[in-house]
Amino acid sequence: MPRLAYGVGTRLVTSHGDPALGGVYKLAAIEIDGDWRPALKRSDSPGKVPIAGRKQLWRVYDDGGTARADVIGMSGEDPPPGRELSVQPIFGDGGSRFLSASEVGEIEPLHEVVFTGGVRLAPAADLDTLRRRRSADVERLSPETRELVSPAVYDVVLTDRLKRLQTNLMNDLGGEQPS
């Protein structure tokens, strides 16, 4: 099975003593003959390993309308079903908790197609609309998550299918997937 592995570090692409661009671009998939294949950069630091493949995202709200977790899945995958949802951070101590089906009130898709074939599909929202939307999103976080000092962790989790893909790619590259 062909695989794509790559690695470019800051010291390779810039002069070590000079400042580097403060942004990061991580290749997650590559199109080959119309087929998207997942790509992965291996790293000893779990936070530097990109989540491979084309993805989509959902926000899970509890029955009171409070955002409880974001779920990352593979493109074309269905949102998590309305059943108990295992909430385990992507990187962490391996601990997990569960949201029961009765606690899951709404699952909102967050991926929105804005451009297709280089053409914008709808006019851009004005700045006031974007501010109102962002304020409403923040208001839907729990007060504990919005704390400035020692905030509660807001979970971002992978679907089982995406976790398996990530684990298999890491194993193929001879690395260990962080727990």
Image (cartoon, helix red, strand yellow):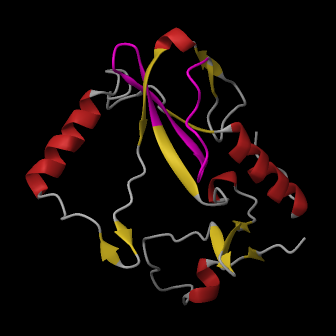
Q: Residue furthest top?
A: 102
The picture places residue 6, in percent across and down from the top left corner, at 73, 77
Left or right of 60: which side holds 158? right
Q: Is residue 25 visible?
A: yes
Question: Looking at the image, which residue is at 44% across and 78% down?
Answer: 21
Question: Which image quarter: residue 142?
Answer: top left
Indicate the quadrant containing the C terminus: top left, top right, bottom left or bottom right: top right
* Placement of 134 over or under 25, stated as above or below: above
**Tally of marks:** 0
Q: Which residues are magenta?
A: 59-83
Name the one closer to the observer, 115 or 86. 115
Question: Looking at the image, which residue is at 50% across and 45% down?
Answer: 57
Q: Is residue 174 visible?
A: no
* Placement of 91 over or under 103, stated as above or below: below
Question: Looking at the image, which residue is at 55% across and 90% down?
Answer: 15
The picture places residue 69, in percent across and down from the top left corner, at 49, 31
Indicate the quadrant containing the N terminus: top left, top right, bottom left or bottom right: bottom right
